[in-house]
Amino acid sequence: MYTRLSCSKVFCPPWRRCISGQCVCKMPYKCPRQDKQACTLDGSHYYSMCQAKAISCRSSEPVFSHFSSACGAEEKVEVHLRKSKKHNVVMIKTAKGTMPVCGNGWNMASANVVCRNPQKEPRGAETATTIKHSQIDKASDWPEECMSVRCTGSELSLAECTIYNPQPITESTDVAVVKCYNPKGECKKFLCTNGKCINQGKACNGIDDCGDYSDEMCCQRCNGAFHCKSDVCIPLDAVRDGVRDCLGGEDELDENPKPVEIKPSDLFSDPMSEIRAIRSSTESQLQCGVPNMEYEFKQNATLRQRTKRLVGGEEALPTQIQWQVAIQDEGSIHCGGAYLGGCWVLTAAHCVRPKPKSYRIKFSLWKKHQMLSTTDSIPVKNIIIHHEYNAQTYANDIALVQLEPLNLSDKCMKDNPAVRAVCVPWSTQQFQPNDTCTISGWGRDRAGMSAGILKWANVTIISDCKNYYKDRFLPGMECAGDLEGKVDSCQGDSGGPLVCKDASGVSYVWGIVSWGEKCGEPNNPGVYTKVAHYFDWIRFHTGWAAVTKYNQ
């Protein structure tokens, strides 16, 4: 089952990175420096909460305490339970004093954090309830203020949650109480991945009832929560909060209702602001998946867009598909590819052989045999064919082309306004069957004639491809097209990109044109190499910066 550490479904926090579908601990030095100094429970300090969390990641023991320039012991944030009659009242100690946690906003996600530490129950809480302050045992003194908290459920202590400034307690004020989990034999309800048993009705409500988020990871619909396209439920207060939670970014679209704005003066501690800053800083360094809209080809009377359909496709404008490249082999172009950024191009293994000097990569090419003013022709330094590529079955039909760097430079081409990189998908769940994507290339038409001008067409991802190709359809392959045969990739399109755009407008190279039968005929969809299946292989050879966005 999936959990919050399954990065094929969700994003890793800044102190973890995605490796083979799992969020694993980063080395602390990989965390960027932030404005606020992070203090720890033992009184030491780090240059960010991310660094402190990267240290605690390996032991699963809390390290972070609070943000401060002094890191004094009196400022330390601690939590304990105070007994009142039959209830365990949650108490929080900060520089503001020791007081109960307010009942408003209190839920199972926060209760799980309390029971996980310091109570040492890894599965979290059994119940998260509230009682009226008037029900508290009055035999002993109780503070006259309480502090609200909001947790995602992943935190190791309440210090890592958002903490609000104290508010006065009245007789009608609710305060938080908790009962930590106590297993009771065989589970006949919803069994979480961590072994916790919860009521079926608590699954898919956007709240981490399990303690590992496994109850929110496989939901066709959500109850009072936001449904991500990858079938993950997230709480409504995570929508438009400045942190991308859904893989496609649909939770941050302007069309979604904006949550109630929280004033900075209301907050005692806001670790989410650091997560927001790290995400924003890291993502701004990677430019992929968004074409340069400022560089538009201007149509004129002598060169106008044509509407003639070629194997279901249309001729592109000269600088329309900015990540499309042509692979020239000893003067001839038979394949395409996708520019990944840096010095890297992605193509099909059957398009290349390990003789880099025989190839050149052409960027911003429109007419196959005529260069534009923006066209670049770059020599090749290295060709990396997947080590398990099988030329007979087209298994693992994927290759990387490394470009030759410019003299005395680590760049491989001069800045070109008509060239942009496409992003690489890290999760096989980012796009789903029936999604519409785009193919492009100089492939042949129905009459077998090679296209002289770059063309494109929209195709649909097809889910049941094994029904059409039986045992020939292997892991790492994807089908797309039109079962009526109206659109398809054809010979000469090989190695070219199948590009899908997510809800936020970022484009990913979802597939590489690989093989198919009976080009453009019904019930013979095109077969593509599924790029996300090879994410770790691509990252291993290219390095992180040239790979992807939104999943650092």
Image (spheres, rainbow, N blue to C red):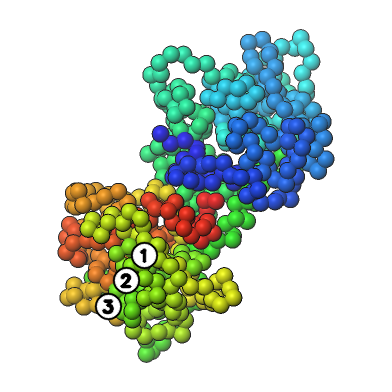
| Residue extending furthest toward the bottom | 302
| Quarter of the rendering occupied by the N terminus | top left
Let me know if residue 223 appears in the view.
no
Mark 1 vs mark 2: which is more N-terminal?
A: 2
In the image shown, does 124 or 265 lie closer to the viewer? 124
Instruction: Give the residue at mark 2.
Output: 335
Do the residues bearing badges 2 and 3 touch, measured as CB atoms within 8 Å? no
Instruction: Give the residue at mark 3.
Output: 451
Q: Distance of mark 2 from mark 3, alpha carbons? A: 12 Å
Q: Residue at x 66, y 51 (%)?
A: 32
In the image shown, does 139 or 321 lie closer to the viewer? 321
Camera-near label (2 vs 3) is: 2
At which x and y percent is residue 350? 29, 64
Camera-near label (3 vs 1) is: 1
At which x and y percent is residue 52? 68, 40
Do the residues bearing badges 1 and 2 touch, measured as CB atoms within 8 Å? yes
Report helix, strand or loop for mark 1. Answer: strand
At which x and y percent is residue 145? 76, 26
Q: Amino acid at mark 1?
A: Thr
